[in-house]
Image (cartoon, rainbow, N blue to C red):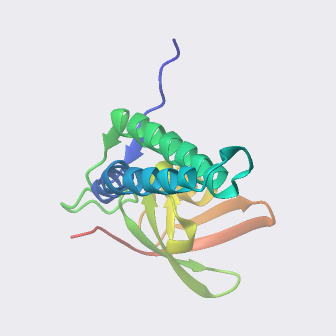
Amino acid sequence: MTAEKEVILTPEGLAKLENELENLKTVKRKEIAARIKQAIEFGDISENSEYDDAKNEQAFIERRIMELGKMLRNAKVVEPIKNGEESVQIGAKVVLKDIELDKECSYTIVGSAEADPMNNKISYEAPVGKALLGKKEGDEVEVVIPVGKVVYQILSVSWPE
């Protein structure tokens, strides 16, 4: 049996996954069971697209429940360091300046399970996240990305309240 990979989470990420799991188990399972029951009432299930759709959604929900359960069993919650830590760690919010474009952006460094680039949450395992770990305000960081290299200056490192 292979060892399962540790899932690094912030306290916020842990709560989000726990809430999603609870919602799937208590709300979504009931909703999908009702849809399947209704589809069966339509008659012949061999040519019933509503039944097929509901069964497919049920399979997706059950897979997600198993996936979330596994993630939570292997979770390691990383508490953000608040007492004077100046270097970038998991949980830190980092404001960066793209030196070439003279443009600012900010990211929160999180574990891969809660990474959400559309909401400025990047994994510590992603190229930018890796490059930032351990760096401090004022440092310049060179990051190799698919389109080349980007040089960022760290403008600030802060921690959630």
Q: Residue furthest bottom?
A: 102
The answer to whether 121 is drawn above or below residue 42 in the figure is below
Residue 124 appears in view: yes
Give the left or right position of residue 146, taking residue 14 as reference: right
Q: Residue furthest left?
A: 83
- Label total for image: 0
Of 150 and 77, the residue lying toward us: 77
The answer to whether 26 is drawn above or below residue 155 in the figure is above
Of 117 and 125, the residue lying toward us: 117
Name the residue: 63% across, 88% down: 102
Residue 134 appears in view: no
The answer to whether 40 is drawn above or below residue 161 in the figure is above
Give the quadrant of residue 7: top left
The answer to whether 11 is drawn above or below residue 141 in the figure is above
Give the quadrant of residue 28: bottom left
Quarter holding the C terminus is bottom left
Query: Looking at the picture, how far across and down is residue 36, in whole percent?
Result: 52, 51
Name the residue: 56% across, 42% down: 59
Q: Residue furthest top?
A: 1
Query: Looking at the picture, how far across and down is residue 115, in whole percent?
Result: 50, 58
Query: Looking at the picture, how far across and down is residue 123, in whole percent?
Result: 52, 55
Query: Looking at the picture, how far across and down is residue 105, in whole percent?
Result: 54, 80
